């Protein structure tokens, strides 16, 4: 007996009927049995997941039937596969086959850009933003996003939330980058951008973030709900004598959106809807801040009037002291340290504004 589980195997069946006179081998039957259990187990998992919404059993079940082999994984000696429907989210107009590392950066880019409604450009390198700006036009946003770190932008991933026209395409074309993502493109823009045959050009369709994320750990899997909290000024509790201005509140909201999507420990410095610099993935919050200050100065940014956002609390007042001496006068942080008051006292003594949100944004 030979099981034919779906229409996808009709061609296989037709070959057996026409070329093998309907006689199957053990290998043929094993292959079709494999396809059959792939289909039935997928349905079984979907049914279990439906009922488990109420039961809440701590069981991990994920099935994705469509996978595509990648050239390699994170490094050339590692095999890689993407399981999912990439074409449901993007239409690829140009370029080479997308890679494992491209997929990680694209995921980081679209999730971060999803935080912003105004015309915004995000430049991602190794899953972190190295440039980001929100402006009245994509052309202006591109100029200021690139200015944030034109060195790291080389070979990066660009994501924008408005149509790309010829003016913006001409600017972008001066930079080597791996992937560009936009909701639409002018034809003249595509003529320019597609002049590089390996450059990946994607049209983004509707994007709905996954409600959970998971990863393999040790001999199992850990799963968590998506970090879906985005603090607005209404969520910011002033704790200092000096209260933040409306402009500072706007900048703190902007900076905190970036912090949420940056590897911990992280510090983000921003002003006027522009990412000035961020310290990413540091083992010390002080190191993250010093890295951010050094980067900002290296690219010609003065920090007078800038705001600082931290993904977690300050265990000591050293960070606010360093920030103060660099010209930063407004700070947003989650709070929760037993020594919060020491940081607040320093701010009070030096005319700084601080707000606390109560929400930590670790990202590992």
Image (cartoon, helix red, strand yellow):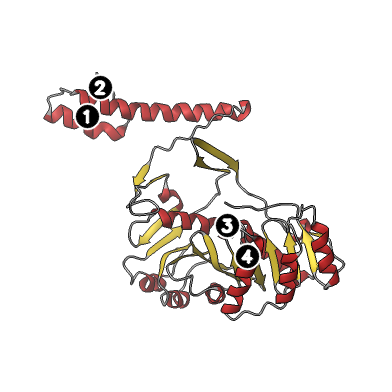
- Where is mark 4, residue-wise? 287
Question: What separation in Å lies between label 1 and label 3 (alpha carbons)?
Answer: 50 Å
Question: What separation in Å lies between label 1 and label 2 (alpha carbons)?
Answer: 9 Å
- Where is mark 1, residue-wise? 13
Q: From the image, state whether disc 3 or disc 4 is nearer to you.
A: 4
Q: From the image, state whether disc 4 or disc 2 is nearer to you.
A: 4
Q: From the image, state whether disc 2 or disc 3 is nearer to you.
A: 3
Question: What separation in Å lies between label 4 and label 2 (alpha carbons)?
Answer: 64 Å
Q: Quadrant of the N terminus?
A: top left
Q: Mark 2: which secondary structure? A: loop
Q: Is residue 28 visible?
A: yes
23 sits left or right of 174 in the view = left
Q: Mark 4: which secondary structure? A: helix
Q: From the image, state whether disc 1 or disc 4 is nearer to you.
A: 4
- Where residue 74 appears, x then y in whole percent? 40, 53
- Where is mark 3, residue-wise? 263
Residue at x 43% of width, y 38% of height: 64
Which is nearer the N-term, disc 2 or disc 3?
Answer: 2
Which is nearer the N-term, disc 1 or disc 4?
Answer: 1
Residue sticking out furthest to the right: 241
The crowding category of the residue bearing disc 4, from other C-alpha atoms within 10 Å (few below 14, some 14 to 19, many at least 20), is: some
Residue sticking out furthest to the top: 1
Q: On the image, which quarter does residue 56 sit in?
A: top right
Q: Which circle marks residue 2 in the picture?
A: 2
Which is nearer the N-term, disc 3 or disc 4?
Answer: 3
Which is nearer the N-term, disc 4 or disc 2?
Answer: 2
Residue at x 27% of width, y 32% of height: 9
Residue at x 46% of width, y 26% of height: 44
């Amino acid at each position: 007996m030979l099981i034919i589980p779906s229409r996808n195997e009709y061609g296989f069946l037709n070959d057996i009927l026409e070329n093998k006179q309907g006689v199957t081998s053990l290998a043929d039957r094993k292959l079709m049995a494999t396809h059959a259990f792939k289909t039935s187990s997928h349905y079984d998992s979907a049914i279990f997941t439906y009922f488990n919404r109420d039961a809440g059993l701590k069981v991990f079940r994920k099935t994705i039937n469509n996978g595509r082999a990648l050239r390699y994984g994170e490094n050339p000696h590692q095999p890689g596969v993407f399981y999912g429907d990439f074409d449901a989210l993007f239409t690829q107009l140009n370029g080479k086959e997308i890679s494992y590392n491209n997929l990680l950066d694209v995921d980081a880019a679209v999730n971060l850009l999803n935080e912003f409604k105004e015309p915004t450009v995000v430049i991602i390198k190794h899953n972190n933003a190295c440039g980001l700006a929100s402006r009245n036009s994509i052309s202006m946003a591109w100029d200021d996003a690139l200015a944030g770190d034109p060195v790291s932008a080389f070979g990066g991933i660009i994501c924008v939330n408005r149509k790309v026209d010829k003016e913006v395409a001409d600017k972008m074309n001066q930079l080597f980058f791996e992937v560009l993502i936009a909701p639409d493109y002018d034809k003249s823009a595509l003529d320019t951008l597609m002049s590089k045959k390996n450059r990946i050009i994607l049209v983004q369709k509707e994007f709905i973030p996954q409600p959970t994320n998971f990863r393999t750990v040790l001999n199992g899997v850990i799963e968590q709900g998506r970090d879906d909290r985005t603090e607005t000024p209404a969520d910011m509790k002033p704790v200092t004598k000096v209260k933040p201005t409306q402009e500072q509140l706007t900048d703190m909201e902007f900076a905190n959106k970036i912090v949420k999507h940056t590897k911990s420990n992280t510090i983000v410095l921003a002003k006027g809807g522009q990412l000035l610099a961020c310290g990413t993935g540091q083992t010390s919050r002080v190191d993250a801040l010093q890295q951010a200050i050094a980067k900002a100065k290296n690219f010609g940014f003065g920090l007078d009037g800038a705001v600082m956002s931290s993904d977690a609390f300050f265990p000591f007042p050293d960070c606010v002291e360093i920030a103060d001496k660099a010209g930063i006068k407004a700070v947003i942080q989650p709070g929760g340290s037993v020594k919060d008051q020491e940081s607040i006292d320093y701010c009070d003594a030096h005319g700084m504004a601080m707000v606390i949100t109560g929400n930590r944004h670790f990202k590992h």
